[in-house]
Image (cartoon, grey):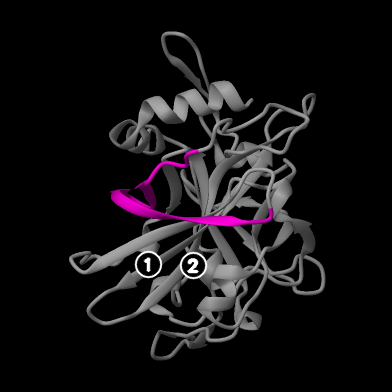
Amino acid sequence: MFRAVIVSSLLAFVFSMYIADPAKWERHQYLVKVLTKDTKLKNISTCTGTLLSPSVVLTSSKCFPDTRKNLIAQAIIKKKDSSATMNKAMLAVKIDGDLALMKIDAVNEDHFCDKEPHPPRVARLNFKPSLTDATYRTIVPRDLQDSKCRVIGFETTEDVEDFATSHKVQVLDLDVHADTENLMFSEVNSNSTGRVCWDDIGAPLECVLDVENNKYVQVGIVSGLYGREMDKEDNSTMVVVNCSEVQTMQFVVFSDNTFVHAIENVDKASVFEAQDKCF
């Protein structure tokens, strides 16, 4: 296991993905910006998430403090076939381990999504609904080590306002390695791999599970950023302030029923319907 250094919920400044391939938000319309605010302390934190249905957003539990009494949150979502965005208030949140499922004010569009070749409107997940049930594909970290994988996030900005209005997206191809039953990691090499940074917590880890159809499927989320040890004698860990100091990205993958149970407790019907209609 690696040493945790800091997470996005502790920062008011925004640093995001950089040294990665540029992309258009229009091609990844399921990518969502998550903003949380403590109305008493006035602290604003930023994360990334994915749209699972018109009313459900998946992100990291690290985006939310343990005490949520004074917390409000919203999701910034790309409008379909438009350069504009919409802000959707969080109505409730279900925290289950490392995952957070946000119930949001539903996206109200006459035609929510189109199938291929149109860009995906929701994240492609590791199950396919049927009329009576859903077929789940368990994610085994070791099986992903030879797969094509990537992280999609938003380009670096220096403050919350810029993060909220920027439309720039980055795609980062990765070599991922198994850590535990539900954790994976990727070493950071700024000359080749690129980096993620603080508000990429919650960003989707996507891998190609079937080489024949060559479709990227969301198999997990970015859950942690790690740095080097500062002093082994006193067992302290370096506090990473600059993104350049990040050496490892950690991911939580959907290796058990945690993700499925969280969906069932938020809005199972809308997520299943979106997977069926959008893919």
Is 88 above or below relative to 214? Answer: below
Q: Nearer the viewer, residue 31 or 262?
A: 31
Crowding at mark 2 (Cα within 10 Å: few <14, some 14-19, many 20+): some
Q: What residue is drawn where x is 42% and y is 29%?
A: 270
What mark, if any, has residue 2 been given in the picture?
A: 2
Q: Nearer the viewer, mark 1 or mark 2?
A: 1
Crowding at mark 1 (Cα within 10 Å: few <14, some 14-19, many 20+): many
Q: Nearer the viewer, residue 232 or 47?
A: 47
Q: Which residues are magenta?
A: 83-108
Percent from the top left, x then y, of residue 43? 34, 80
Q: Which residue is mark 1?
A: 36
Q: Tag 2's secondary structure? A: loop
Whether residue 107 is in magenta: the answer is: yes
Is 277 above or below relative to 30? Answer: above
Q: Given the image, on which type of amino acid does mark 1 rest? A: Thr
Earlier sequence position, callout 1 versus callout 2? 2
Percent from the top left, x then y, of residue 16? 61, 72
Residue 15, visible in the rendered structure: no
Q: Nearer the viewer, residue 224 or 62?
A: 62
Percent from the top left, x then y, of residue 99? 39, 49
